[in-house]
Amino acid sequence: MFRIAAASLVGTAIEFYDFFVYGTAAALVLGRLFFPSFSPLAGTLAAFGTFGVGFLARPLGSAVFGHIGDRYGRRPVLLASLLLTGLATVAVGCVPSYASIGMAAPVLLVLLRFLQGLGLGGEWGGAVLLTSEHAPEGRRGLWSSFPQMGPAVGFLLANGLMLTLSSTLSDGQFAAWGWRVPFWVAGLLALTGLWLRRSVEETPQFRALAETGHRADAPLSEVLRGHWRLLLLTGGALAVGYAVFYAVTTWSLAYATEHLGVHRSVMLACIMVAVALKGVATPVIAVLGDRYGRRPLCLAGCTASALWMFPFVALLRTADPLLMTLGLLGALLGMVTMFAVVGAYLPELYAPRIRCTGAAVGYNLGGVLGGALTPIVATALADGSGPPWAVAVYLTAIALVSLACFALLPETNPVVVRQRTGAYANAEKGAAETTAPA
């Protein structure tokens, strides 16, 4: 299990590295390089617009790769999605700026960002099913949390490299070529991930489906026809996690550097500390999900997120590195209380024959609802000299919507469900015995 979980973690980390390095570049340099005729605010909004394109592509990628995963196996998804995302990311680092090729530059940027999102949309489903379908029942949450640590590792790799480059290069060097280096590094990382995943075995549940001939012929159609309500609920439930994560890692970086005068190296360091601690907390929270259930932790995470958004904005506004880190960390801990368990939760909501499609589309639909628009909306709401309380209102509203969606979803942890069912059955039996005639 450790070898399988490590393979899923490494691959997910590499794919999210590819995705996050674009978000950091969008916050720091892409606006003025690819949209130079815009004002600074409009340029940042346009760069975040291309960032959002990746989220719009993710549900399509999850549908395409989900079909492959449900029809032909989880393993091909792991290899194809990693290759697609890696190639697209390397190509982003090679796109000339607007000054060199004019409008073709932002057009190429949007196209490659779309391909990045397409690949990442397939990655998550394959990675979590690799671990969840191999894992023993009582430890499914723990092992499925390994791919959930991938985003934190990928973010630290991407931003660690960005931080090093931005600290050692002049502003002119960083804008001219320094920002491209992390994109080129993605090629080496993708080759490493492919090498690690080459010997991964197919999951037992898919092998059983293949042997019995019970694979879905059209998994997406089956999901949309028979499980559309579940799909919408899972997308809405996960929206707050995406919104909070990208508010912390992308919007706050742009806001602090442009509005508060915080140096980009300082802000990147604050975000990286918060994300590293989030990564450490992920398996710990997942173990709690194995013991107490997935749904209670998701409800607690949504509630914490709703309560923390105003303190988050207030602490960010201080521009003090320690206080900003505290605000960022509090937001991410609320978010990870949900996302530490969704690697087990979402697959358990769907039958094995449509699991790769259903879980992946639901997960990435949450990305569209919560992640695609958050940097754009938050940047627009924060324009001005006053505290960006409107951003806190926006994030709190998303948290409340997600809380309502989680409240309508069932518990899926098989151990917890059996315990509750057994307790109910014993209580019914006891009541019957006490009321029976002597």
Image (tube, rainbow, N blue to C red):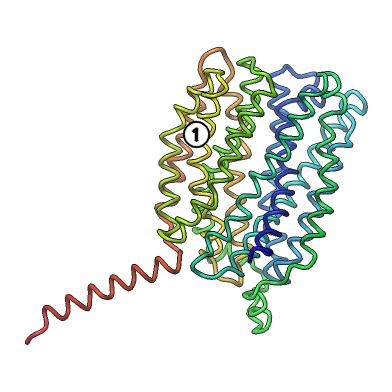
Quarter of the figure with residue 414 = bottom left
Q: Quadrant of the C terminus?
A: bottom left
Tell me the residue at 60%/50% (across/down): 365
Residue plotted at (66% across, 28% down): 268
Q: Residue tagged by mark 1?
A: 395
Residue located 64% across and 73% down the image: 216
Asked which secondary structure carries label 1, the reply is helix
Residue 168 position within the rendered picture, expressed as x and y whole percent measured from the top left: 80, 24
- x, y (%) of residue 225? 56, 65
Q: Is residue 220 visible?
A: no
Q: Is residue 342 visible?
A: yes
Q: Residue furthest bottom?
A: 438
Q: Position of residue 196 (x, y in %)?
A: 78, 60
Nearer the observer, 334 or 39: 334
Q: Is residue 356 left or right of residue 76?
A: left
Picture layout, residue 9 above or below residue 402: below
Task: Count residues near mark 1 (Cα–Cα under 10 Å), then give few for <14, some for 14-19, many for 20+.
Answer: many
User: Quarter-wise, where is residue 79 in the image?
Assistant: bottom right
Rendered location of residue 369, percent (x, y): 57, 43
Residue nearest the observer in this picture, 384 or 132 = 132
Q: Amino acid at mark 1?
A: Leu
Give the vertical position of 351 relative to 363 (above or below).
Answer: below
